Image (cartoon, coloured by chain):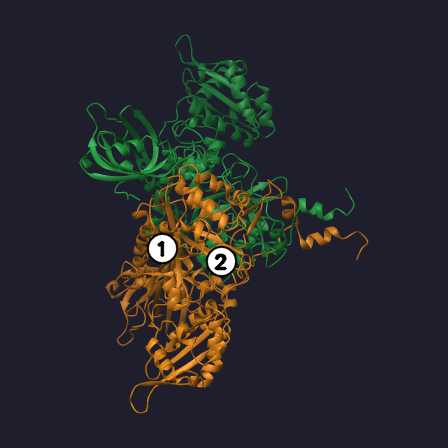
Chain colours: A orange, B green
Amino acid sequence: MLKRTHNCGELRSSNVGEKVRMAGWVHSYRDHGNLVFIDLRDREGLVQLVFDPEQHKEVHAEARKLRCEWVIAAQGEVRRRSEGMDNPKMATGEIEVAIDELEILNTAKTPPFDIDSVNEVNEETRLKYRFFDLRRPAMQEKMRVRHRVAKMVRDYYDDNGFWEIETPMLGKSTPEGARDFLVPSRLYQGSFYALPQSPQLFKQILMVAGSDRYFQIVRCFRDEDPRADRQAEFTQVDVEMSFVDSEDVMSVNEKLVADIFKNVLDVDVSLPIKRMSYKQAIDEYGIDRPDLRFDMRLHEITDIAANVDFKVFTSTVKKGGIVKGLCAPGGGKFSRRDIEKTLTEFVNGYGAKGLAWLKVVAKEDGSGLTVNSSIAKFFSEEQQQEIISRFDANDGDVILMVADKEDVVNKSLAPLRVKLGKELGLCKEGSYEFVWIVDFPLFDWNEDEKRFDSLHHPFTAPVPEDLEKLESDPGNIRSQAYDLVVNGSEVGGGSIRIHNPEVQAKVFDLLNISREQAEERFGFFLKALDYGTPPHGGIAFGLDRLVMLLTGTDNIRDVIAFPKTQRGQCLLTDAPGEVDKAQLDELNLRTQKHLHAVEKKPGQA
Amino acid sequence: MLKRTHNCGELRSSNVGEKVRMAGWVHSYRDHGNLVFIDLRDREGLVQLVFDPEQHKEVHAEARKLRCEWVIAAQGEVRRRSEGMDNPKMATGEIEVAIDELEILNTAKTPPFDIDSVNEVNEETRLKYRFFDLRRPAMQEKMRVRHRVAKMVRDYYDDNGFWEIETPMLGKSTPEGARDFLVPSRLYQGSFYALPQSPQLFKQILMVAGSDRYFQIVRCFRDEDPRADRQAEFTQVDVEMSFVDSEDVMSVNEKLVADIFKNVLDVDVSLPIKRMSYKQAIDEYGIDRPDLRFDMRLHEITDIAANVDFKVFTSTVKKGGIVKGLCAPGGGKFSRRDIEKTLTEFVNGYGAKGLAWLKVVAKEDGSGLTVNSSIAKFFSEEQQQEIISRFDANDGDVILMVADKEDVVNKSLAPLRVKLGKELGLCKEGSYEFVWIVDFPLFDWNEDEKRFDSLHHPFTAPVPEDLEKLESDPGNIRSQAYDLVVNGSEVGGGSIRIHNPEVQAKVFDLLNISREQAEERFGFFLKALDYGTPPHGGIAFGLDRLVMLLTGTDNIRDVIAFPKTQRGQCLLTDAPGEVDKAQLDELNLRTQKHLHAVEKKPGQA
């Protein structure tokens, strides 16, 4: 086999005159009567090969046999392309290689789709032929970025005294959070391992074990119901530190994020990344992962709404609801149908019953602004002006309002804000706005079950000043949790953990987890807490999501070499699949299908 | 919380006079009447703290409350220890810190065992209290080395153009090799994922996909029967390269191994590592992973044995067996009982029926050597001299021989050689002898099933010159496989793979795998092979095993933070465990225990 001296994509004018050898795939083929031109492709790019029958008759004859995606190795001399034949779109576009030796390493069946026009190919075909789909330069680039990001992560933590420590994949099922994937044990029949949803307890135990600074890029598993943007197995950058407070954790980790964005996208992230309280995020953006690429904040007008003549508003306020809205700059151009059908149906999808609107226009006499709406009549002039002023509205804007229970208002206005931000072009393409959300509530009140739920997880520590509220006012305890949000996506989150067994016990009480249940679910962890646990905290980043942001894709499957469909199928290998009955027998396991066979009596249909 | 300025283990005389803050665990406590001395421990080591009531009365009073393994933060001034109080065994032994502020961060229950005397503690207790066991400096050091090795691996491959690409954990079961761990699918009931035994097919598919150079540090799973030196989940350094031959793969990877040994142990590995054919390894060491730290090669004397008067030898040779042995230098000191009981029983354990021995002694008249043995009389003087000469034996040696079928001879002599090498002190402690074993047979003849088995796996490529033997003489085809052996342990192995679909089909035929079976098991892979597969090959290293070698332990559980017992139990978390019936119901799965309950009829006992 001809041994490579160069990758295809790396040849430049500076190589002119050199004898080189490359290997790769035939990307395109042009037979120009006498000369044959081939674009040869490898991971690093394309290079043009020329076969000239005048120079090397037999090699040229061989070259004429080539077809797209055949695998070859070739040797020749680098030369400048002929006058006017440069291809500025190709990194190697100034040169070509005049081939004097060719080795056909493998043939190939006709490609399942055109490698250059993937947008017309359905994703099912791409996943089925993943070995071909991954050859596309755009996919290669995503894999390259993913590798680089993982490498930067590892370099950074290593430089900062973190050790990568592996935690088990075959763990114990703890019926918490999402559904576990189970792995039946053959040696302990009737017992199961569970694949980790995250190494949360193991990383905390490593802190108890004195590991001090731990990280791991680790596979995690959640057997959730199908969702477009989720994968049953996903990859997490998992971090834990001892003797730290939340500022320490945020400060160490935001530097890494800034490094990555600088390195991959040449984006400057100014440090420290701003902190925003959960309360402010909900008040101003309706959501704890605000997209800060544009302003268009929410404003509450419950105080004004209580006194208008508009029954929808007043009755909502009377029932304890709120009225909140946003001012869409330039939204005055929306037609009544745009608002009352398209946008209203949009918020209906999030539970809001309707969308009240006020178009803001300049008064004809030039004396200021007024509103224009079918509901304008329910507002006094003073109220109209108050609203205009609260939203800081201008001529040509539209104010859109929802009146409902607080959570419905926020849950519908937040996505409406993002939708309008994008449609009105407020959202700068290529900009990245980072924010740490802090001061989360420790608990969420679960109205159905009349108990508290953890907003993060039950090991999250309360803010020290709020510890006394564990008895008196648990609903208002803030936690030492922090989420890193970029352009409205949560890319990481974590917290300082409880290191005091008494506080941990009190939190379990509030979550209605009995001592026995706690003991059964994570007794091993509670035991560890008793043997000298340092103050500690950590964070986890979703690597898939981070790489999506960095490569500008909305499709999580594009950043995973061998992803599964929404329903957890691998279209390449056909997993999951049936297994031999012998395998199940060894596990002493029956599926329903086998069960039916077992339960059928002889002679029965 | 007092924020650390230093780790405990890093303070030196050069820090004298500095105000420092450390945090960690109380390693030991000495109350000397007025002064209290504490050795404070963190991941980086120990430092002595001094509490003086004359200086800080309240801090001293606080310090008297401390107990072993309590967690504290402390501030003070570094000073030289008093004259004669230096502790040369401690890296920080020249200094101490006079504490002026103390913060008790957590208390601790009485440790489950003495942190300094772990050899007396049984492993079960260590595993159960792993959070404490890992605090021991010896275990911390193993985790540190493991992290460093993983980091070096990643740096090296990255520097050499390899991309780390993640492959799925939830894959398809292929009933090959070891038993798979299965993961029932909830969305496709009756179907199962399997955890990967290795990413073999995925990494080959990445080569088809043009990834060119891939590596991954990846968890692999084998549901094997309990063995002391195996874990159900283990970690592999997995590598694959395109457009390479076996020399390329060995050369890239041996440089990494040499770097690691230099870096961790300051051992120089001279490159290239020597290559030894499989045949030579079997002939001279009886095994394909020879321990080359000492010589004591095996020698065959079947030719001589055929003509002696000793029936054990002659009848073995007549039946097609062989006679082979080794000369143990200085083994003449073994008593008859040592040989005929201890060593004979040892080889019996490997299937050999007996051990023939000849002690070599100087003739009394000084005219040369002779043998001394109850069987000496069966050998002519000439035969005795031939044997002495073949084994290059000296006065005081003993020649030990086994006569049997070839594989029994090798399987018993190989471990005998290692045993004697160690017992006779031939094996240099701290030396590392590396060898690549190459030119393996492609197939092993399976006498029971009258067919060939793959010696490695069915994707291993034959040596090109031997391709023609696929038809004529498959038993004598050499493969392009290579195993890296260090001190008798295999630390890595790989091969060039078949990239030609026709050769692959022919190999399946010889393995008695029908087209249908091949299609069913790895049809997706065979399909990929058709679409332009480059020549490729790779290797995998056992990371656990490598770290064991580097940290000098024989216990695989010592290099894994949270290992399982031989029977696959995690004594810390108690995995595997029972799961809620609801979880099984969602999977539509029954264990035998549930089955019985289901099958019981109402009213029956």
Above-or-below relation of A411 to B257: below
Looking at this rendering, what residue extends furthest in the top direction? B365
Q: Position of residue B225 (x, y in %)?
A: 57, 38
* Residue in the picture at 68% in, 55% down: A593
Element under label 2? strand
Q: State whether residue B179 is above or below residue A436.
A: above
The label number, if any, that marks residue B217 in the structure image? none
Quadrant location of the C terminus of chain A in the rendered image: bottom right
Whether label 1 touches label 2, CB < 8 Å? no
The residue identified by callout 1 is A3
Of residue A218 and residue A22, the one placed in the foreground of this image is A218
Q: Residue at x 33, y 44 (%)?
A: A243
* Residue on which disc 2 sits: A445
Q: Is A139 situated left or right of B580 in this image?
A: left
Residue at 40 percent of width and 11 percent of height: B367
User: Where is residue B517 drawn, in percent x and y?
Assistant: 61, 54
Please state which amino acid type lies under the numbered disc 2.
Trp
Q: Residues within 10 Å of mark 2 (few under 14, many from 20)?
A: some
